[in-house]
Amino acid sequence: SFQNVLAFPKPLQRPHPPILVGGQSQRGIARAAEIGDGVIFYNLDIEDVEKALEYYEDELAKHGKLLSEAKIVVGRRNEVRSQESWESDATYIQEIQKLGVVTDVVCSPRFPTKGYVEAMTGYAAVVLNR
């Protein structure tokens, strides 16, 4: 909790918005299980996500929490601007979804400002239409 802090507008969620803790080291995952409502993993291969989820589930149990009640976000950065790399993101998203417990997958391709809308539209077409 914080003392003498004013924050506006007040959140709609009660008792508060979910607290997601980023981390993929054992200590970071343990911290997420202890103090958070969920965890964020970033730039991990599918196998590493599976291992992190197993460890997270064990840590949650120590605090009387269930994996099925946690919000789990997996992120991935894609620096390449090719159809092949976009298809790689689409495959990654599908594989993460097969794990069955991840609530959100965030891929963040990098596009220059000029032509951003066109590039992002092409990326979305590939990733969302699989």
Image (spheres, grey):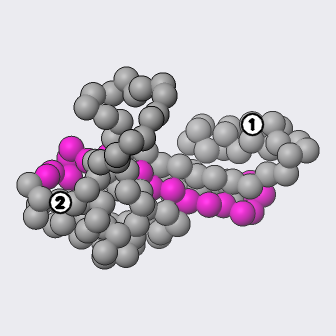
Checking the image for residue 121, the label placed there is 1
Determine the image quadrant of residue 103.
Answer: top left
Residue occupying image coordinates x 15% and y 51%: 66
Quadrant for the C terminus in the image: top right
Disc 1: CA contacts within 10 A as few (<14), some (14-19) or many (>=20)? few
User: Cα distance, mark 2 to mark 1?
Assistant: 39 Å
Residue 56 in the magenta stretch? The answer is: no
Amino acid at circle 2: Leu
Q: Helix or strand or loop: what does disc 1 sit on?
A: helix
Question: Which residue does the numbered mark 2 point to in the structure image?
Answer: 60
Near-viewer residue (84 or 35): 35
In the picture as drawn, the residue positioned furthest to the bottom comes out as 26
Q: Position of residue 32 (x, y in %)?
A: 30, 60
Q: Position of residue 11 (x, y in %)?
A: 40, 28
Answer with left or right where residue 56 lies relative to residue 72: left
Q: Position of residue 124 (x, y in %)?
A: 67, 39
Determine the image quadrant of residue 28.
Answer: bottom left
Amino acid at circle 1: Thr
Checking the image for residue 64, the label placed there is none
Residue occupying image coordinates x 75% and y 36%: 121
